[in-house]
Image (spheres, grey):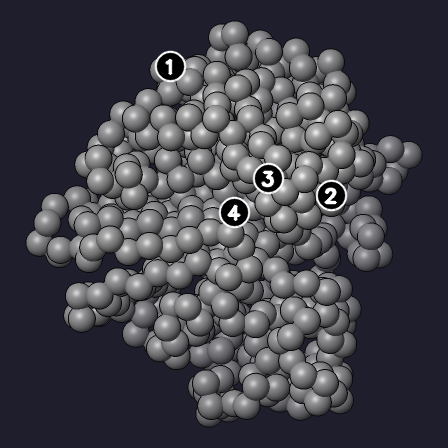
Amino acid sequence: MDILAAGGNAVDAAIAVAASLGVVEPYAAGIGGGGFWLIYNASENKYRFIDARETAPKAAHRDYYLKDGKPDRDRSINGPSAAAIPGQPAAFAYLSQRYGLLSLPQVLAPAIEQARTGFEVDARYQKLANFRLHHMRRYPVTAEIFLDDNQVPAVGHRIVQPELATTLELLAKQGKAGFYQGALANTLVEAVQANGGDWTLEDLANYQVVEREPIVFEYDEHTIISAPPPSSGGIALAQMLGMLDAYQQQTGTDWRQLDKVAQAHLLAEVMRRAYRDRAEFLGDPDFYQVPVDKLLSEQRAADYAASIDANKASVSLDMQGPANLHEGRHTTHLSVLDKYGNRVSATLSINLPFGSAFTVAGVVLNNEMDDFSLAPGVPNSYGLVGAEANAIAAGKRPLSSMTPTMIESCDQVAVLGAPGGSRIITQVLLGTLAHLQNEPVEQWVSQPRFHHQYLPDRIQIEPDTFNSSEINRLNTIGHEVRSVGRQYGNMQAILWDIQQGKVTAASDPRGVGAAEVLSVPQLNIR
Ligand code: GLY
């Protein structure tokens, strides 16, 4: 809000928020990670998608994590061997220069100040530090900054990050080169190599963000704009809505008219099918020709819709696809709309809480390498083969589920997205469906969630999503239903009703975020 008040636009504000989140949510995202930025740039009336996903270092290859033919998950999850080359610092510099109004030092100033003065530990921090405690203790620099005498800090304990402040200052002053070249790059590479990783100065110097065409599709008089590969989100969202449309055409059944259980069954079936394709066909488009046209074709939606039985769950293993999915409780999301109508939907990640648990120069390095299919051709933990599309290669971006999204109709604009690993895409689907039913924005973010990701072959739910009789009905038609034992996700959403001249915004009650509306965009302002 300060950045907007100082004359910044939505992009400036989004960079400032992202940088601050990297300080006060060190478990979720930061300059040691990457992300996807979906931007609507009002001055050119154009959507832009900035891919700041991390890249595999040059030393990485298809079998990089195999030990005696099996994935060595410790190396792909913990320590600098798990870290891909970060994209976030390059994104800040690129976005500020191309699309911001303020300077990079201006937009990074609040985060630098917060790193220096510190923030207080809360219950969420404790939970996530506890989850990664064992591995944070393995790396003394991490333990020194983020633990208290090697223990999860008490609520109210202050985390100060002077090294991160210095690193952010270097980025602010020198732009991209301040992070990817020179003294800081040397420090990063030395620390990574001394601790089992393989980064080189060349890897850092070669990192580039990529502007890509977003996935754009129509559903029910709405235009949906979302994340293209190397995210699987936009394609899966388009496939799921395409199947609902085809199912309606084939059977006359509108998902909106179904009771809660019948609707959950139908949605679980479309989720299952989209995630099946995700596992087989999605990867970095610069390395693998993702068959986007085939995946988004009416024929595929029709075939998949025709394979859905209204009274019986399908069996994922009968669909003969690979699987390499795992859940996550990490990542972060922000949504911004400014008075000019510019808007940003950004999902940012270091992968697991506290990323690789390795910190250098105040930067918590990601463990995004684990988002690759670690062993294509080798049975994974579900006993199936992983996908070639997402096999590891030098310079390649690991497949992501991050799904920053916007939805336009003739009189409304929605901005939404969420963290949550493989459950991001279904959260965005449920949020989108709530919007299509004219639910208020608070409902999109707070509604109980459920998820199906093809394998494991079950509907995953939050503890209160369905009551026991609803679960019984789902069991009767063949669905295994299992509570994940906690609430998940953290959606941040905005709805601008252009006709009514009204903006509403909501932050998921599951998280510690906040939503605020200062004013309504004036359409004639540019
Ligand atoms: N690391 C989570 C994702 O990109 O999907």
Three-letter code for the amino acid on which mark 1 is drawn: Gln
Residue 471 image-quadrant placement:
bottom right
User: For the residue marked with disc 3, what is the amino acid?
Assistant: Gly
The vertical placement of 499 against 19, above or below, is: below
Residue 263 as seen in the image, left or right of residue 73? left
Disc 1: which residue: 174
Q: Which residue is mark 4?
A: 332
Cα–Cα gap, marks 2 and 4 = 19 Å
Front tag of 2 and 3: 3
Q: Earlier in the sequence, mark 3 or mark 4?
A: 3
Label 2 to label 3, Cα distance in Å? 16 Å
Disc on the earlier residue, 1 or 4: 1
Tell me which amino acid carries mark 2: Asn
Of marks 1 and 2, which one's residue comes earlier in the chain? 2
Cβ at disc 3 under 8 Å from ligand 1: no
Spatial CA distance of label 1 from label 2 is: 36 Å
- Quadrant where the N terminus lies? top left
- N-term-proximal mark, 3 vs 1: 3
Q: CA distance from mark 1 to mark 4?
A: 26 Å
Is the residue 266 above or below the residue 229 in the image? Answer: below
Q: Earlier in the sequence, mark 2 or mark 4?
A: 2
Task: State the residue lying farthest toward the right.
Answer: 68
Instruction: Report the residue at 59% width, 54% height from top.
Output: 420
List the residue tagged with mark 2: 130
- Judged from this view, the residue extending furthest toward the top is 183
Instruction: Identify the residue position indicated by label 3 in the image.
Output: 156
Q: Quadrant of residue 261?
A: bottom right
Q: Pointer 3 and pointer 4: residues touching (CB < 8 Å)?
A: no
Q: Specify whether tag 1 is near ligand 1 (CB below 8 Å).
A: no
